[in-house]
Amino acid sequence: MATVILTATPSSQAIHNNVVATTTVTPSGTYTYDYTLNGKTYPNRPATWPMTSGTTQNHSLSVIVKNRNGTAVGTANTTFTTQVPSITILPEGSVSISVDTTDTILTSWVSHGSGYIYEWQISGNSNTYSGNSFSPNSASTGTHTVTLTVKKESNGATHTIGTATKTVSFVAAPRPLDTNRYPKSISVEKTYHGLIRPMSGVDRSYEGDSGADIAAAKGTPIYAAASGTLRYSYYDGNDAFSPNKGYPNDTPYRVRIKLDTPIVFEGTTYCDNFYTHLSGIVRNKGRNEDKKIHVRQGELIGYCGSGRHNMHLHFAVYTDFSSNEKPIRAPKIQTLFSSKYGDKWIAGK
């Protein structure tokens, strides 16, 4: 039998408010890890496994370590206290598919994390496609079932994180993204503290994030949440998660707008809106603040792209434009928009 040590400690990523389970096995080797948290089993997790936390509660955690043959070689258990009434599993959680049927672009969403392996399969087609987003050019026309399997490598082994399926009607041949088919502006039907929802999609934010993550298909139009002056709109090749930094899936176009009319939320004044992970922008003004370009609320400013591994818009509301700027963090930003995690957003509504 192997010697197994199990610990549960606060994550170094304090913004995520996580607890991390860590299993150490002697002798070292290729193993799989089946965790049991408060009586519920989570099989085939990595040796280092993050979980979210919040108000005080005691938890029990155990692990069974298995070798390549699936034989248990050791166990360990521990207890720990978090700051929440219940634990939410993250990142091995939801896997979903969104599709733009006009352009036949399939995109994935995996709840939190990075380093994923994507395997797409289409009914009636023996090929396996990779990537977090793709256009199945070789797919037959008609209605097909698309299956996405998301995997991750850990300690020399590949684990399945989750799967999703979706029925899709393919057009004869996918065509390039046609941005001309989107309106250049939308009517304002409802405002929240003076803002509109900038893009249609599904809220996939996580607690503590500096804004809202809205998942949608690549190329979904993004509209200005409020009127203001562009501070910048450009491709940020030096962004920490840009392709230049080793994240080939990221599309680091970003837009920042100084609001004409600051908003007040819970007693604090906020003056800026920020949009990032765009696949394209309408007005490319770079970082030249002397070049005054005004944007109207509801005006088209760009298109949804990818942040590392998921197609989404990251939308933030900041107090000011400085090194001391403060955002409305999730879930407060959902409260601002009168929504809950997982809600459908509709641009302008």
Image (cartoon, rainbow, N blue to C red):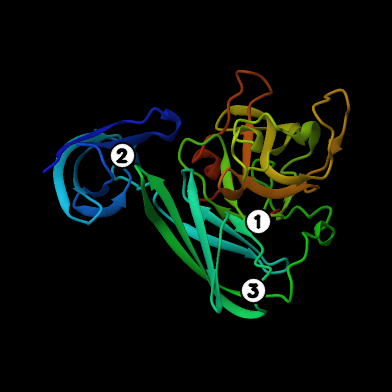
Badge 1 marks a residue whose secondary structure is loop
Which one is in front, 25 or 98? 25
Residue 84 has which mark? Answer: 2
Query: Which of the two discs, 3 and 1, sits closer to the camera?
Result: 3
Q: Is residue 167 left or right of residue 16?
A: right
Q: Which residue is mark 1?
A: 200
In the depicted structure, whether residue 55 falls above or below residue 182: above
In the depicted structure, whether residue 312 falls above or below residue 165: above
**Amino acid, disc 1:** Ser
Q: Mark 1 packing: few (<14 Cα in 10 Å), some, or many (20+)? A: many
Q: Do residues under tags 3 and 1 come within 8 Å of each other at their CB atoms?
A: no
Q: Mark 3 packing: few (<14 Cα in 10 Å), some, or many (20+)? A: some
Badge 2 marks a residue whose secondary structure is loop
Q: Earlier in the sequence, mark 2 or mark 1?
A: 2
Question: Residue 229 location, x and y as percent?
Answer: 81, 32
Which one is in front, 188 or 140? 140
**Amino acid, disc 3:** Ala
Residue at x 19% of width, y 36% of height: 27
Q: Earlier in the sequence, mark 2 or mark 3?
A: 2
Residue 134 has which mark? Answer: none
For the residues marked 3 and 1, what is the alpha-carbon distance in whole angstroms?
Answer: 27 Å
Residue at x 77% of width, y 65% of height: 175
Q: Is residue 311 left or right of residue 176?
A: left
For the residues marked 2 and 1, what is the alpha-carbon distance in whole angstroms?
Answer: 31 Å
Residue 30 falls in image quadrant: top left
Residue 52 falls in image quadrant: top left
Query: Which of the two discs, 2 and 3, sits closer to the camera?
Result: 3
Question: Residue 192 location, x and y as percent?
Answer: 64, 45
Question: Residue 28 location, x and y as percent?
Answer: 24, 37
Q: Quadrant of the C terminus?
A: bottom right
Q: Which residue is mark 3?
A: 139
